[in-house]
Amino acid sequence: MATAPFQSILESKLVQFAIGPEKKEFLVHNYAVSSLSRPLDRLLNGQMKEAIEGRVVWDDMDEAAFVRFIQWAYSGSYTDPEPVIFTDSSFTATSTTKDGNVAENTTVITGTGNSVTIALEEDAESLVSYKCEKCPDPRKKMQMNKKYDENYGPVLLSHARLYVIADKYDVPELGELALHKLWATLKIFTPYPSRLGDIVCLIAYAFHSFSESAEGDKMCDMLVHYSGCIYENLTAYDGFKTLVQDCPLFTHGLMKKIAERLS
């Protein structure tokens, strides 16, 4: 990202953002956001209500995603969340709604979940086409999940949410970085049976976010590719059946990917 001149940012007026269902308020320098793309410039400096009032309401945006978005707008990078470590041998593998929030009907999974089939190395390496050559390699700072009780759902969704924001507001540099970080995380992710819900939630969020345009989207395409690599693992997870029923575009893409692997 070609970061906006810092003095120009500081000299610009402050804009109020109301984020999430609770409409939590943040004050952000106009130029830090408006300089990112034409849609954002029109939003903050054009003839729209937001520009006139100096207030933007994004009540459908995740608060943590907004904070990372603004962090990136100011600095050109954003901080990855840490995986959540469960402290009990019995825990809940969550599913998400179409907006990426935790659903009410969660499935409880017990036991160690140590049995796992790792995707073939050549399949994992085939994900390299989604790597951003301009982005620093985040794997140098990442650790592979070595235990079944490390919930990577928040980590995966954080990158996916930023990718969706970047697509919606035409900020390709952010989209490339978010996709790159998601790719790097999936490359080192161990698909323990009790952690497959993390992947299913990610896929559901991605395909619901792009709906009919999912077929040509790079993140959705990568997730189809990745699912083909760990297909045997996913079919053993109950929530995967619901995903297949609810996301026909994902299912169609996955069947094509499996057919390619078998041919």
Image (cartoon, rainbow, N blue to C red):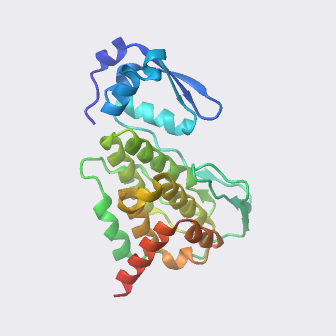
Query: At 38% across and 87% down in the image, what residue appears?
Result: 262
> Quick one: 227 or 48, which is closer to the camera?
48
- Left or right of 89 in this view: 183: left
Percent of width and height locating residue 224: 43, 68
Residue 227 seen anywhere in this rendered image of the structure: yes
Query: At 24% across and 47% down in the image, what residue appears?
Result: 134
Percent of width and height locating residue 257: 39, 76
Q: Quadrant of residue 105?
A: bottom right
> Quick one: 94 or 78, which is closer to the camera?
94
- Left or right of 25 in this view: 229: left
Q: Quadrant of residue 91?
A: bottom right
> Quick one: 138 or 163, which is closer to the camera?
163
Residue 37 seen anywhere in this rendered image of the structure: no
Looking at the rendering, in which quadrant would you find the N terminus? top left
| Whether residue 132 is situated above or below residue 8 in the rendered picture | below
Residue at far bottom of view: 263
| Whether residue 90 is situated above or below residue 209 in the rendered picture | below
Percent of width and height locating residue 172: 31, 43
